[in-house]
Amino acid sequence: MRGRGVSSGRVAAEAVLLAAPVREPDESTVVAPGDREAEASAIEWAAVAVADQLRARTRAATGEARAILDASRLLASDPELVAEAADLVRSRGRTAARAIWETSAAHEKGLAALGGRMAERAADIRDVRDRMIAEILEVEMPGVPEREEPFALVASDLAPADTAALEGGNCVALVTEQGGPTSHTAIIARSLGIPAVVGVIGATGIPRGAVVLVDGDRGTVEIDPSSSRVTEAKAASLVVPFDGEGVLADGRRIPLLANVGGAAEAVVAAASKAQGVGLFRTEFCFLDRADAPTIEEQVDAYRGVLAAFPGQRVVVRTLDAGSDKPLPFANSDAEDNPALGVRGLRIARRAPKLLDDQLRALALAAGAESALVEVMAPMVATVDEARDFAERAREAGLETVGVMIETPSAALLASEMLEVVDFVSIGTNDLAQYALAADRLLGELGDLNDPWQPAVLRLIGQTGAAGRRWGLPVGVCGEAAADPALAAVLVGLGVTSLSMTPRALGRVAAALAGVTGEQCDAAAQAVLRAATAVDARAAAAAVLNGE
Ligand code: PEP
Ligand code: MG
């Protein structure tokens, strides 16, 4: 099968399908009086089975995950919940599944009414409900499967919370029918360092239990490969080590930084010798939150990342909620065109306190750690937005302030942006999406969401030229920064640092070590004359490799 390889590496493992969500059980089915006792006891059995499952998983887990599992286990064995559901079966003839659904809904409502921390427990109730219903109906538990053995997860698409749940599990590859190269599924796969292929039409039809060889470089999925192909795949998935310094052949330094979404990833990035963090996606810390995190909770989350990089640069991005990463506490309304809607910095129009609290929390975290903290805003389109953001950030006590260049408007105004901020960082994923007017989540439009598209390269060139004019830093933190073939071109276009998934650091460093600044400039000039993405790639290769 073919799709689009979005996260490098090759791995062979058993294919496991992401189970469909549990549907609301039918209300109209009435259990005959003679069968009700047996139906009620199914609830008791399911409760025992789910509590056992959770107990086993609690034993294997650590830290926060352990506490959450243990709380869910207690819920599953809650005699009140079981008794109420069994009662519904006996008195009203509800099916066991329906009775659990109704009882959970009542408990959930009660918790939601209490608000705050208690309201968040509603998600745990739904989790236990789904486990019990799946047990009763003898179907796979919805969401990311739990497996003792390594597996390749196959899905139509993954929600951000599903992908977040992959961390620390046994999932070693991802295959999805939907999704483009810059979707968050792809980004998380890269940060977890597991191969991923998206846009694979018919992937969910892969037979259960089949072994698949997922090649994230070639974008292929082989079903039941030969053992020699599997051995070959193992040898090919090695990461190129990074020695901790991005430098051109002529000695010019190009810092190579990491993209992270939280403390655990920051620790991995530091171990990979990243020279700092070029993009800390703060929204990833709060994807599962129903209400806004408090300042204290934010300080904790940010300090976790800063602590991994003492004395080094850490660029923190304010919440980029909305579009494909909605946060319930920031994006309340459904929008027809969320990628063009109230996302990123635009949320501050409606909820200025959310931004000010975040800036305050960040300033407190920065004061408590030795990392050199910089802050930047996502989804900026106008100079007024940039100026307003810079004022707020400085007022909160943050000195070095920047904006992301993700809209064509921001790229065209880069020089004016740099009159009001200290640096810019190009988000090539969104810049390509908005320049080509192509949804980055649509696998079908993957060829348009390509940083090698000449229009995107020219917008990057315009931004780089503005940086050179003012002598100010221009970073790239979109996925383009992880493309070794593009790295030299970006430097020639005026980019001064590159930020990427830690696994890509070694390959990008190796590509830069082989070229001089002069060659980078020549490659940049060549791609700026190209009319198509194919021409741009060929022009760069001709200058850099003499191809
Ligand atoms: C980008 O758009 O390139 C970027 C780095 O931000 P995100 O991928 O989180 O939207
Ligand atoms: Mg973006």
Image (cartoon, rainbow, N blue to C red):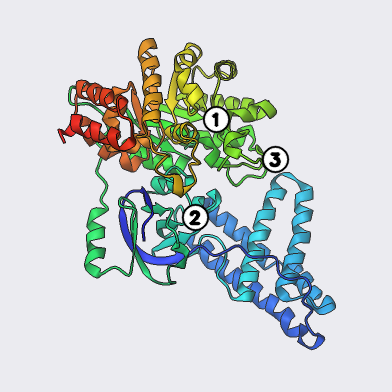
Label number found at residue 62: 2
Q: Looking at the picture, which amino acid does disc 3 mark?
A: Asp
From the viewer's perspective, is residue 27 above or below residue 490?
A: below
Q: What residue sits right under mark 1 in the picture?
A: 318
Q: Secondary structure at mark 2?
A: loop
Tally the numbered discs. 3
Q: Looking at the picture, which amino acid does disc 2 mark?
A: Thr
Tell me which label, 2 or 1, sits earlier in the chain: 2
Q: Secondary structure at mark 1?
A: loop
Q: Residue at x 52, y 67 (%)?
A: 56
Q: Residue at x 45, y 22 (%)?
A: 411
Q: Which of the pair 238/121 is nearer the observer? A: 238
Q: Looking at the picture, which amino acid does disc 1 mark?
A: Thr
Q: Is mark 2 within 8 Å of ligand 1?
A: no
Q: Is mark 3 within 8 Å of ligand 1?
A: no
| Local crowd size for mark 3, using a 10 Å CA cut-off: few (<14), some (14–19), many (≥20) | few
How far apart in space, not on screen, are marks 2 and 3 (Cα)? Answer: 36 Å
Tell me which label, 2 or 3, sits earlier in the chain: 2
Q: Position of residue 255 (x, y in %)?
A: 31, 27
Task: Give the quadrant of residue 507.
Answer: top left
Label number found at residue 333: 3
Task: Give the quadrant of residue 46.
Answer: bottom right
Q: Residue at x 54, y 41 (%)?
A: 285
Q: Residue furthest toward the front? A: 531
Are discs 2 and 3 less than 8 Å apart at CB? Answer: no
